[in-house]
Amino acid sequence: MRLLLRAYYERLHERMDAGRSDLVARIGTLLAAEIERQGFGPMGPEKVEAYREACLAFVEERVETYNPVGIQYTFDRRTSRQAAELEFQFDWYDSREEYQGLVAAARALAGEEMSDELLRSTADGLIRQVGAFPDRSIIAGYGEKPTLQKLPDYVVALAIEQVVCGRETGEG
């Protein structure tokens, strides 16, 4: 199961890197639509650009989060668990239930021994099934109480689900 989760994050990293230009384009469209839909305007072009830049910074953060040689692999399991608990506490959305669902889905899909090709294919299936962690939590948290502070996270989560995961979000 751990190997499948690593493959899941690696495939998300590869897909985000490959789809970066599509992500950027989708972010522009989703951001403008959400500002209009929520009545966050009127906003001058400078302010809209500032939110777009924040979204792009969040994309880069997410790419690094999924990076197979990223920071999540530099800690032992105990330290990694502590870091995850801190992250759960600091985020404005609660992603614990979503993470438990990701682990359960990975456990159900993982086989005893999987070839690299099967592992990659199964990771792609996991992405189709559950999306990119923690997008569902971000989308749900924003939906409960939309604010400008949450807007960049939300727009990035929608864009990742649509472009990287090929999942319909019902938004944008």
Image (tube, rainbow, N blue to C red):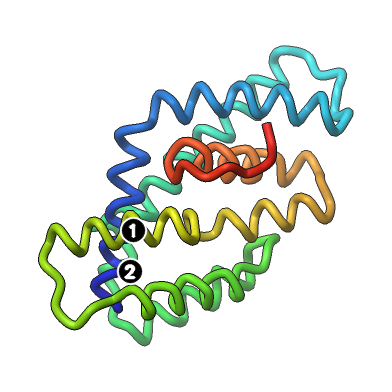
Depth order, front residue of 22/43: 22
Q: Is residue 91 left or right of residue 6?
A: right
For the C terminus, the image quarter is top right
Q: Position of residue 50 (x, y in %)?
A: 64, 25
x 12%, y 62%: residue:
116
159, above or below 10, in the image: above
Q: Are marks 2 and 1 in contact (CB under 8 Å)?
A: yes
Say left or right for 10 vs 20: left
Which residue is at the front of the view, 25 or 47?
Answer: 25
- Expressed as whole percent of the image width and height from the top left, the position of residue 158 reads 59, 41
For image coordinates 54% across by 59% down, the residue present is 134
Tell me what residue is drawn at x 46 percent, y 59 percent: 129
Image position of 128 with respect to 113: above or below: above
x, y (%) of residue 145? 84, 52
Q: Position of residue 111 (x, y in %)?
A: 23, 78
- As measured in the structure, the alpha-carbon distance from the residue carrying label 2 to the one carrying label 1 is 6 Å
Q: Secondary structure at mark 2?
A: helix
Instruction: Give the residue displayed 43% in from the left and 53% down from the top.
Output: 128
Q: Amino acid at mark 1?
A: Tyr
**Amino acid beneath label 2:** Leu
In this view, 152 is above or below 132 = above
Where, by quadrant of the figure, is residue 17 drawn?
A: top left
Residue of label 1: 9
Which mark, residue 5?
A: 2
**Along the line of sight, which residue is nearer the eye, 37 or 53?**
37
Q: Secondary structure at mark 1?
A: helix
Res. 69 in view: no
Q: Quadrant of the N terminus?
A: bottom left
Mark number, residue 98? none
